[in-house]
Amino acid sequence: MYKVVSCLGGRWAVLTGRFCSRPSLATFHGASGALCQKSAIKCPPTDLPDMPPCTFRPEEYKGMSKERMMEIRRKNCNPMTMKVTYYKKPVFIHQGYMQWLWDVDGRRYLDLFAGVATVSVGHCHPKVTAAAEQQLRKLWHTTSIYVYPALQEYCEKLASYFPDPLKVIYLTNSGSEANDLAMLMARLHTGNFDIITFRGSYHGGSPQTMGLTSNAAYKYPVANGLGCANTMCPDVFRGLWGGSHCRDSPVQTIRECSCAQGHCIANEHYIGQLKETFATSVPSRIAAFFGEPIQGVGGAVQYPKNYLKEAYKLVRERGGVCIADEVQTGFGRTGSHFWGFQGHDVIPDMVTMAKGIGNGFPMGALVTTPEIAASFAKGVHFNTFGGNPVACAIASSVLDTIREDGTQQNSLHVGTYLMTELAKLRDKYEIVGDVRGKGLQIGVEMVKDKASRDPLPTTAMSEIFEDIKDMGVLVGKGGVYGQTFRIQPPMCITKEDVDFFLAVFNKAVHGYMDRQ
């Protein structure tokens, strides 16, 4: 897996994605945009994993300097932009193609985070790009006050991916918008107000959805999301209860389990906690229950196999509707099913989605039943950009591409391979506590040690995170304590890409352990 190459040849090509006859000279651009030469590039280590080849060649970057970009970022962008910037030495992205990204220096990265689980079929996928270009030449924008083909064509196509009675669609611009709308529709339809979500969940950052979100990092000390209550997340690795047969994943936890076949004690305990929430935290009648089929920002947390089925029954008994947040799990990402909720053998009353719906183009949607939709029509709600013709054309092409490219099947096969190989590294290293997920919705939870399952400190996570990036791979972080590496790549990655990442991750963890 490791390939020793010369700094003056092959390794430079591996890092930059192109062969260069003079790697001792690097091109850079001054604030004026003038092309300059800078010598004395540090020769990278020569024992790094060999990056898979790529025939695509990015355009040469001729824009402003990195220094100028950071100056503007600090001066003119909201401070939150700097706060969320990944890495001590940020990555300056210039161009992307399928699973690859290039920075302004021409260095290539394997993208395993897909712009926060958003690029579904691949950066600048040729089919989706062609659909966008075709629509842009025809009609950029109009709204739903007029009838235009792209909206109807897409809504009919998207509805065909859902079971009855989930056939009515409202298009938005983001997942936060879709979830905000779902809250409103649930309250209008049921005549109730209170909504329950899991601890550790993330459902958006708007004033209303902030109440659904249960993670202190995304909270502000202002009134938000009134009527929202949280129940214990049925996390079978970090939670109070869990075992080795609980979840629907190729990889189970390292926790011991004495449950009989088909009987999960952990599930009973977590359902008991939900009943406790009903008894203590909300009125006897509620509006809704929100749940991601697999938590995203929470760190790819999975629940016991029958949890959602039993939870939905309890919610409906109390007058509430059940809402599946598919913003990160939808469009085949879990591999076994097109929608994450299908893996739990349930049918929600509402489904929200965004991110992968447009392969990076801003779009969201809410799918519900005719009955619930009729309750919403009592007033007037208008979204200027929801269902924009360009968005609809792109999203329609994404659905076609998933089918034509076998994207969902690729998620299943490549994702299962990745998880089973990561499990071997979990068994090898004391600080790799858990590997979980389905398809290409994967989490790797890092711990101080397997006995305590205490989160690996932030400083340690950052060290490993930086090393992975420096070897040419981009991953994400999540979990309530920032202790989980999130792997949610464009769903076009290959087993060869996976082998490269496994070598990188192994080297990064091994390097951290050696430094202790």
Image (spheres, rainbow, N blue to C red):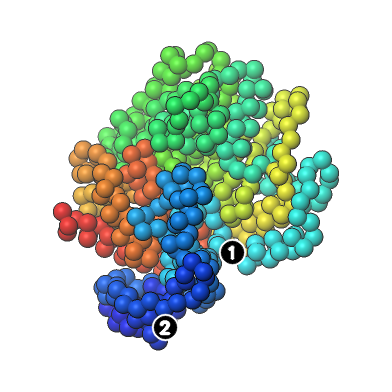
Name above or below for residue 129 compared with residue 319: below
Tell me where residue 339 sits by quadrant.
top right
Q: Is residue 480 above or below residue 273?
A: below
Left/right of residue 383 with respect to residue 120 in the rendered view: right
For the view shown, which residue lies furthest in the right direction?
A: 146
- Return the residue at label 1: 124
Residue 502 shown left or right of residue 493 in the figure: left
Amino acid found under the numbered disc labelled 2:
Cys
> Mark 2 and mark 1: span between their CA atoms?
25 Å
Residue 410: percent from left, percent from top: 50, 60
Query: Looking at the image, can residue 396 be seen?
Result: no
Q: Secondary structure at mark 2?
A: loop
The residue at 62%/67% (across/down) is 126
Residue at the location (71% across, 51% down)?
392
The mark found on residue 20 in the picture is 2
User: Which x, y percent locates residue 236?
Assistant: 34, 36
